[in-house]
Image: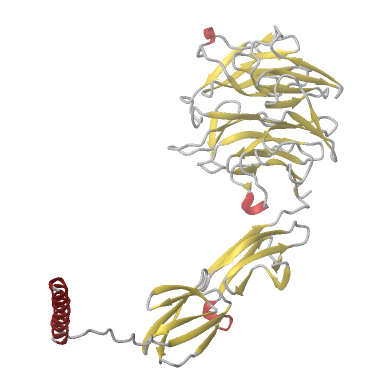
Amino acid sequence: MRSFFFSLNLSKIFLFSLGLFYFIFSASSCNKEISVTPPDAPPPNGYIYIDSNPRGFHLYLNGAERRRATPDSLTWLNTGSYLITLKKDLFRDSSFIFYSVEGEKPRIYIDYTKNPAMRGNINCTSIPSNAEIFINDSSTGLHTPSILTAMPGNYYIKYRAKNCRDDSMLTTVSSSKTTTTKFALVDTTQWRDFTTSNSGIPSNNLSSVVVDQNNIVWVGSYANGYFSFNGSKWTSFYNSLSSAINCITADVSNIKYIGTIRGLIVIYNDASTVEYGFTTSGLPDIHIFALAADNNGKCYIGTKKSITQFPGWADYSPTNGDGLPISLPISSLALDKANNIWAVLNDTIIVKSISLNKWIFYTTSTPGIFSNKITALAVSQSGDVWAGFDNGKVFGNGLSYFDGSAWNKVNPIPSTSKTNTIFIDKNDNKWVGTNQGLFMFNTPSNVTSFNRDNTGLNLTNITDITQDSFGNIWIATNAGLFEYKGKQ
């Protein structure tokens, strides 16, 4: 009985405690404020839709890019004013003020083709003038010189003129700007060009050219050997000496002499070829820089160490007893009517042999010689000897010629150019090949220049020049072979 009452009392105590806890908790809760987050306000619903012609204009809102392009919309705008800017490459930026009203959804369309301020100009000029102008292969009905107006973008502009080769280029037009598109069209009545892309010529990087008695053109290259052209077909030749050809010449008997960095190649009657290289005891040095053939069946060979006559391998080199420097590379050779040898020795001295038994030296101390960087020699029909030089960085540049008694300076070429070769034709016209183009004159006061700007041809680094029996001039360059027919 006592245990029963004890258990009953514990139950009453538990219920009393639970009720007390509930009362305290409830009283405490009644004294606190309960916080409730109000619902989010609805986002602004201002809106504008923008489309344009052409499309693809990037949208900016108050100067900030929205990473959208027409046609597209700008959303979540509050009621108020906004600066909207449209941007696209080549076009002028355009801006306008937009007043947004929530709940309204205006649509704006901008036609840039109707705004003259968005257009640009193409200044079309050509040599010769009066060339028909095409844009994206469609004739404009206009002729050079003319100015075309067009929307911004890229256009193929093509010119066409009588007796000239069509030429075209990609031109970019920008708003409110003028782009000049100028072509020199190749006059096909005066010029022919031979490159690996338009003919069978094996190389564009050419070192030398000569025309033989049969009007066959022989060409040497710096890396692809030598080859010939009979007017319609190119023929390549294999040799075991070297594919690097430095020089080519031909004599009155139609024998061709080809100088390489590893010896001499002699071609007889276009059928028999003999090579003189490492095993040839008569050739003092195999690295051949220059060749010159006389009218008596002899060829003079300029090497690193000598001036040698072929056939016979006779040595005509000056010696130290003649007052020469020890080093003796011969970089240029020429023969006058008396078969006197003119040579460039060690890039510093011009040497003349009189009757093959006496040497006269002309150095930079000689009046009338431009510099000690002599790069080319040629003898005119009248007997004058012409010398060309490397570009004059300080004192300018030009040509020097020896009239039989003294040297004279003339300036028919740009002072910044380097003379690579000189050729004098049967009419005594001087043709000077430089790193800046081709120059021709009979007298230094009347010079004609030929370059890309006035011929349309890549007449830049000219390496050799010759003439055929028809009077055509052949020009070897590092960008192919060119034939100038002139106004014959």
At 62% from the left and 73% from the top, the residue drawn is: 148
Q: Nearer the viewer, residue 68 or 141?
A: 68
Q: Nearer the viewer, residue 129 or 36?
A: 36
Percent x, y of residue 401: 58, 32
Q: In the rendered image, which quarter contains the N terminus? A: bottom left
At 60% from the left and 26% from the top, the residue drawn is: 404
Percent x, y of residue 328: 56, 15
Residue located farthest toward the front when viewing the structure as drawn:
1
Instruction: Name the colour scheme.
Output: secondary structure
Q: As displayed, is residue 8 above or below residue 370? A: below
Q: Nearer the viewer, residue 229 or 291?
A: 229
Could you tell me if residue 355 is visible in this image?
no
Give the side of residue 434 with respect to residue 293, left or right.
left
At 42% from the left and 87% from the top, the residue drawn is: 45
Q: Image quadrant of residue 385?
A: top right
Q: As displayed, is residue 351 above or below residue 168? A: above
Q: Image quadrant of residue 483?
A: top right
Percent x, y of residue 217: 79, 34
At 66% from the left and 13% from the top, the residue drawn is: 356
Q: Image quadrant of residue 234?
A: top right
Could you tell me if residue 141 is visible in this image?
yes
